[in-house]
Each structure stands twice: as C-alpha cells, then as structure tokens.
Image (cartoon, rainbow, N blue to C red):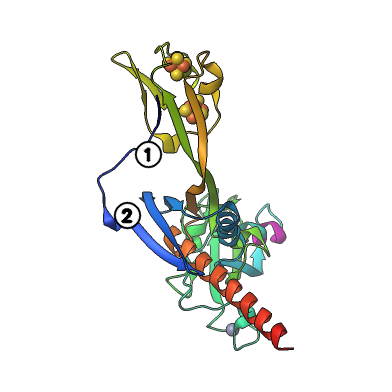
C-alpha cells in the first residue's frame, strides 16, 4: 500500500491564506513563515513559468532606493573617491514607494527634485585616534530614507584623516544595477511528495542515515516522515532503499517560495509590487494585441 505523505498539517488558520487573481485564475498562497525580512509561502495552482516570472520581477523590476550620485568634498582616507562612492551605493536604504517616483517618470524629467531624490550627508574626522566610518554616520534629509543598518562599514580612518561628502539616493531597478535589488534571495522549489510503501518497508533505517535534512526518523520501529517542506528532492533516500519502498517526486503546480528582503522593503510589499508589475505587463500586452487587431 502506497501512502503519499501529506504536508505537515497545521491548524487551519484563515489568516495564513491569501487569494489573488490574475487573468481569471485563483491562486492560493499559504504563509509558512514570516519574519521581519523573510517570508516563506506555498503558491498553489500556477506553473513554473508564472512562478519564475514573479521571481525575476522581484529581483529586477521592483524599485528601491540606493545612492547613485556622490560629491566628495574632502577625502584623506586610504580609499579612492570612486571606491567610497561604490561602497555607499551598495548600502541598502529603507524605501518609501508611496512618496518617491523613478526619476525617469518624475515631472522634473530626471533632473532631481524632492519627488525623486534624497540627499544624505556625511562628515567624519578621526580626531581621537583610528576609527571606522559606518553607514550610521550618514545623515539623511528624509528620516524615512535611511540605511537599513547603522553598522555597515564604509572606510577606516587613521588619526587626523577626514571624510566629507554629499550623496544623492534615488529609486532604481535591479536590472540596471544590483544595488537596486530589493531581495537578497528570491527562490522557489516544487512541493516535494514522499510516498512510502509500508508493506515493503522493513524499517532498516538506511534512508534515515542518508537524508541530509533529517526529515526521516525511526520512531518505535516505524519510519516517520517529518517536515516535507524541508526536503531538497535529492532522492538519496530512494537510492539507499534496496526494497524500493520509498519514492520521492514533486507537485509541478505547487511551489515553496522564499523571499528574503535586503531590508529596503517588507517582503510582502516586494511580492505585492511584483504581482502588480506582472499584471500591468499582461494588460499592456492585451492592449497592444487589440490595437493591432484594429489595424
Ligand atoms: S531504506 Fe527503505 S526499507 Fe529501509 S527504512 Fe527506508 S524506506 Fe524502509
Ligand atoms: S529526497 Fe533527500 S531530503 Fe528529501 S527525504 Fe529523501 S533524502 Fe531527505
Ligand atoms: Zn524629480
């Protein structure tokens, strides 16, 4: 008798289920884990092309703030101006998508104004001895647009060295430069399915020994399948079983997603923005097709 292992059933909690519609398809999202900068969820009733589109948009097309222009006023540190500017650009900044617009979509035409640009200043001198300049030394003109951490090192100064600069942050896209990516990880895998034939299994424990994720255990002489969401589909258990009692496959319409934000935006907002962008692209495609039909 073959019994597919069901995902570890938690108490039904409606708050963990989110539904949204795209092109008339109902998709079910079930949240598995939520932390300040990470969200792990199951996305059901979609195919790999759709899941990958969402992933790619999250990486490349959801805008975030990053420093893009630096005016160095004084720099007696051991690093060249260009290296300091590069390091500043890579500091993730908290982003406010409701206030700021992309410079190319701004009324100023990209010249830089209060709607598309934020100024940050830095002035540090090592008066008492060697010291490190951190992201926390940056003073922003908008308290909402600040580094996600105050502890990111920029440069070390020896006694008497000084760094004074002005920096300008703006919204941008990951496809232009990685400094504008809102995610440090956006990945998915198929939902694993583990089938165990209890009649064939002699509880030898060989599969337990080889499982790198400790999903399989022997409890009171019986093989128990634990957290299948953690299975990496390596099939080592299958290979270790001489009796062909265990089979690992996957559901190609259900995905386990993990989104880890750089801290610029909450992970749910990144997903929401990616879904909006994908919807806009689909609507644009339909409009273009209709226009061509009329010609
Ligand atoms: S290796 Fe095969 S027979 Fe041994 S415990 Fe695992 S499933 Fe059962
Ligand atoms: S496929 Fe790999 S990770 Fe999954 S249960 Fe088998 S051995 Fe463990
Ligand atoms: Zn502007």
**Callout 1: few (<14), some (14-19), or many (20+) C-alpha neighbours within 10 Å?**
some
Q: Nearer the viewer, residue 71 or 145?
A: 145
Give the total of numbered labels. Answer: 2
Q: Residues within 10 Å of mark 2 (few under 14, many from 20)?
A: few
Which of discs 1 and 2 lies nearer the camera? The answer is 1
Residue 10, located in which quarter of the rendered image? top left
Relative horizontal placement of residue 43, taking residue 86 as reference (left or right): left
User: Furthest residue to the right?
Assistant: 295
Of callouts 1 and 2, the N-terminal one: 1
- Residue 268 appears at what percent x and percent y? 42, 60
- Numbered tag placed on residue 16 in the rendering: 2
Residue 233, compared with residue 26, is above or below; it is: above
Residue 89 pos. (x, y %): 62, 61
Q: In the image, is residue 137 part of the stretch drawn in magenta?
A: no
Task: Find residue 141 and report its horizontal and vertical position in percent.
Answer: 48, 75
Residues rendered magenta in the picture = 81-85
In percent of width and height, residue 23 lies at 51, 69
Circle number at residue 7: 1
Label 1 vs label 2: CA separation?
Answer: 15 Å
* Residue 83 included in the magenta stretch of the image: yes
For the C terminus, the quadrant is: bottom right
**Vertical placement of residue 244 versus 256, above or below:** above
* Pick the front one: 219 or 251: 251
């Amino acid at each position: 008798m073959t019994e597919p292992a069901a995902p570890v059933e938690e108490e039904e909690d409606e708050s963990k289920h989110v539904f949204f519609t795209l092109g008339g398809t109902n998709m079910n999202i079930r949240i598995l884990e939520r932390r300040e900068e990470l969200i792990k969820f199951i996305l059901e009733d979609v195919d790999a092309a759709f899941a990958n589109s969402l992933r790619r948009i999250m990486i490349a097309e959801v805008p975030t703030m990053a420093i893009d222009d630096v005016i160095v006023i004084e720099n007696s540190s051991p690093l060249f101006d260009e290296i300091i500017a590069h390091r500043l650009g890579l500091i993730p900044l908290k982003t406010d998508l409701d206030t700021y617009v992309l410079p190319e979509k701004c009324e100023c035409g990209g010249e830089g104004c209060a709607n598309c640009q934020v100024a940050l200043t830095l002035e540090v001198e090592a008066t008492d001895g060697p010291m490190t300049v951190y992201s926390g030394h940056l003073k922003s003109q908008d308290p909402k647009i600040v580094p996600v951490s105050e502890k990111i090192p920029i440069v070390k100064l020896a006694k008497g060295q000084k760094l004074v600069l002005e920096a300008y942050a703006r919204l941008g896209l990951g496809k232009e430069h990685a400094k504008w990516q809102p995610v440090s990880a956006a990945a998915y895998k198929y939902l694993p399915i583990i089938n165990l034939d209890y009649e064939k299994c002699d509880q030898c424990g060989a599969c337990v020994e080889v499982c790198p994720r400790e999903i399989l255990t022997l409890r009171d002489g019986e093989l128990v399948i634990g957290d299948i969401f953690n299975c990496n589909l390596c099939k080592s258990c299958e290979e270790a079983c001489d009796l062909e009692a265990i089979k690992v496959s996957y559901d190609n319409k259900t995905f386990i997603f993990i989104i880890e934000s750089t801290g610029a935006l909450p992970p749910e907002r990144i997903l929401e923005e990616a879904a909006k962008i994908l919807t806009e692209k689909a609507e644009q495609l339909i409009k273009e097709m209709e226009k061509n039909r009329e010609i």
